[in-house]
Image (cartoon, rainbow, N blue to C red):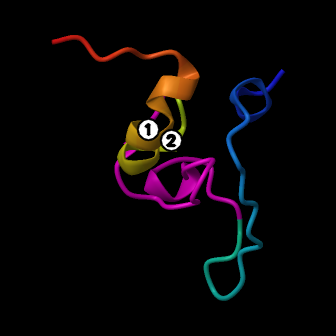
């Protein structure tokens, strides 16, 4: 099962258009957040940006300790 289905995270799948519409095999353009589709601040093991990670950390199973 995919990560998005396990934790019920909304997934956006935008269609790319324009001069950079092809799929990139490596680099920053090949990785985007599964929730908000941004390329900035990606946590690569989760394929999620840092902002979405803070929002969904509890749903994923991370706990905050003092």
Residue 49 placed where, x, y %?
43, 47
Asked whether 66 or 42 is in front, the reply is 66
Residue at horizontal 63%, vertical 86%? Answer: 19
| Mark 2, other Cα within 10 Å: few <14 / some 14–19 / many ≥20 | many
Q: What element carries label 2?
A: strand
Q: Is residue 61 above or below residue 40?
A: above
Viewed as shown, does residue 32 lie left or right of 11? Answer: left
Q: In this view, does 20 lie above or below 25?
A: below
- Which marked residue is nearer to the observer: mark 2 or mark 1? 1
| Mark 1, other Cα within 10 Å: few <14 / some 14–19 / many ≥20 | some
Viewed as shown, does residue 42 lie left or right of 8? Answer: left
- Mark positioned earlier in the residue sequence (2 or 1): 2
User: Magenta stretch containing residue 31, yes or no?
Assistant: yes
Report the residue marked by disc 1.
53
Give the extent of the magenta segment: 23-45
Q: What element carries label 1?
A: helix
Q: In this view, which residue lies farthest toward the left?
A: 66
Give yes or no for contact between labels 2 and 1 (Cβ–Cβ under 8 Å).
yes
User: Magenta stretch containing residue 51, yes or no?
Assistant: no
Displayed quadrant of residue 23: bottom right
Viewed as shown, does residue 64 lie left or right of 36? Answer: left
Residue 22 placed where, x, y %?
71, 69
Report the residue marked by disc 2.
48
The quarter in which the C terminus is drawn is top left
Residue at horizontal 71%, vertical 75%? Answer: 16
Give the CA separation, mark 2 to mark 1. 6 Å
Report the magenta stretch's main SS.
loop
Displayed quadrant of residue 6: top right
The quarter in which the N terminus is drawn is top right
Residue at horizontal 71%, vertical 49%? Answer: 10
Q: In this view, does 47 lie above or below 10?
A: above
């Amino acid at each position: 099962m995919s990560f998005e289905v396990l934790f019920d995270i909304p997934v956006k799948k935008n269609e790319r258009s324009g001069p950079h519409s092809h799929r990139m095999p490596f680099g920053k353009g090949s990785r985007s957040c599964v929730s908000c589709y941004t390329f900035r601040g990606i946590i690569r093991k989760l394929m999620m940006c840092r902002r979405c990670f803070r929002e969904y950390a509890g749903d994923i199973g991370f706990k905050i300790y003092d």
